[in-house]
Image (spheres, helix red, strand yellow):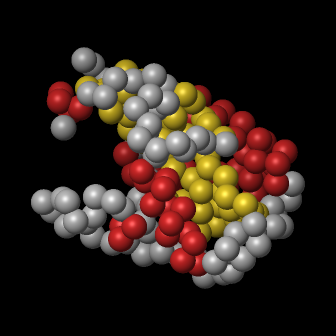
Amino acid sequence: MENQVILNAKQVELTISRLCHQLIENHGDFSESILIGLQPRGINVVTRLKARLEEILGKEVKCGNLDITFYRDDFRRREKPIIPSTTNIDFSIENKKIVLVDDVLFTGRTIRSGMEALLAFGRPQQVELLTMIDRRFKRHLPIQADYVGKTVDTMVSERVSVEWEETEGIDRVLLFNQEDNG
C-alpha cells in the first residue's frame, strides 16, 4: 500500500485552528487551563496549538511537556530500553483544567500512562483529551478524546504518522502499511 495523505499542510493548519476555537469555547481565556503535551509527539501538537491560541487570544497560554516513560505498561517488555525525556511542568496543576494532548489516539494505553504521570504533579480540577488523529477502532481501554482533529478508520496493520515541518520538513498526516514502511 502506498502512503495515503490523510491531511495535507493546509488541512493541518485548518484543523489546528478549529481545535483552538473549540478549546476557547470551553476554556475561555485559558487563565485556569493548561495544555500538556505527551512526549514525544504530543509536544509538536501543543507547540502549534499554543502559537495559534496566543495569536487568537493575544496572551500567553500556559503549556508543559510530560514524559510518560516510566508509567507505560510495556516499559519492561521492550528489547531496547526506552530512554526517558525531560518533563517540563514548572508550575502547579492543582485545581487547574488540564488538556492532555497527543498526536494519535489508538489503543488508549499512552493516554492512561499520561493521566497516571500527570497525577504525580497534583490534582487537577478537570482533565480533557485532545488528539490530532483518532484511530477509533481497536481501543484497549475505555478512553475517548474530547477534541479530535480527524477520525480515521484503520486496520491494525496500518500506521498513522503526524508529520511536522519542524521535524519532517512538511505538515501532513499519512496512513501507510506498517510492514511496507517499518
The percent coordinates of residue 49 (x first, y second) are: 65, 51
**Could one spot residue 152 in this view of the protein?**
yes
| Quarter of image, res 89 | bottom right
| Quarter of image, res 126 | bottom right
In this view, which residue lies farthest toward the top?
A: 1
Give the vertical position of 125 relative to 151 (above or below): below
- In this picture, residue 96 sits left or right of residue 146: right
The percent coordinates of residue 154 (x first, y second) are: 39, 24
Give the vertical position of 60 relative to 130 (above or below): below
Q: Point out the image quarter for the N terminus.
A: top left
The percent coordinates of residue 137 (x first, y second) are: 44, 28
State the residue at coordinates (66%, 41%): 147
Question: 95 or 176: which is nearer to us?
Answer: 95
Give the vertical position of 44 relative to 132 (above or below): below
Q: Point out the image quarter for the C terminus.
A: top left
- In this picture, residue 3 sits left or right of residue 125: left
**Could one spot residue 48 in this view of the protein?**
no
State the residue at coordinates (41%, 41%): 140
